[in-house]
Image: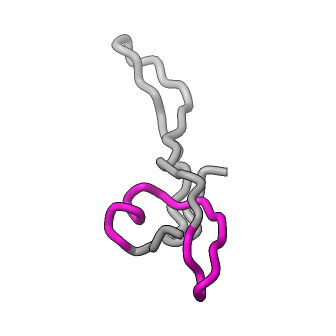
Amino acid sequence: MAKCAICSKAAHFGNSVSHSHRVSNRMWKANVKSVKVKVNGAAKKMYVCTSCLKSGRVERA
């Protein structure tokens, strides 16, 4: 479950292309951490991406 609870950033899909140009499927997962966050004054555990943590959109509990 690599999905941010704040900005809904999730996995992206694409192709892995080798040197000989053979193509196979791959995915990029969002950098998501399980963090205790203050929500309406109470502490709650959520999955938050590191860009939301770094930008200050979320206050840690």
- For the point 63% across and 64% down, the residue is 46
Q: Count of labels shown? A: 0
Determine the image quadrant of residue 45.
bottom right
What colour scheme does the image use? one colour
Q: Position of residue 34 (x, y in %)?
A: 59, 54
- The magenta segment is 37-56
Q: Nearer the viewer, residue 13 or 36?
A: 36
Q: Give the residue drawn at x 54%, y 51%.
A: 33
Task: Residue at the far top: name it.
Answer: 20
The vertical placement of 22 against 5, above or below, is above
Residue closer to the observer: 4 or 16? 4
**Residue found at x 40% / y 74%:** 57
- Report x, y in % for residue 6: 52, 72
Is 21 displayed left or right of 35 in the figure? left
Near-viewer residue (1 or 33): 33
Q: Residue at x 53, y 38 (%)?
A: 27
Q: Nearer the viewer, residue 29 or 43?
A: 43
Which residue, as the protein is rendered here, is positioned at the far bottom?
40
Check residue 2 for magenta coloring. Answer: no
Quarter assignment of residue 5: bottom right
Residue 18's x, y, as percent? Answer: 40, 17
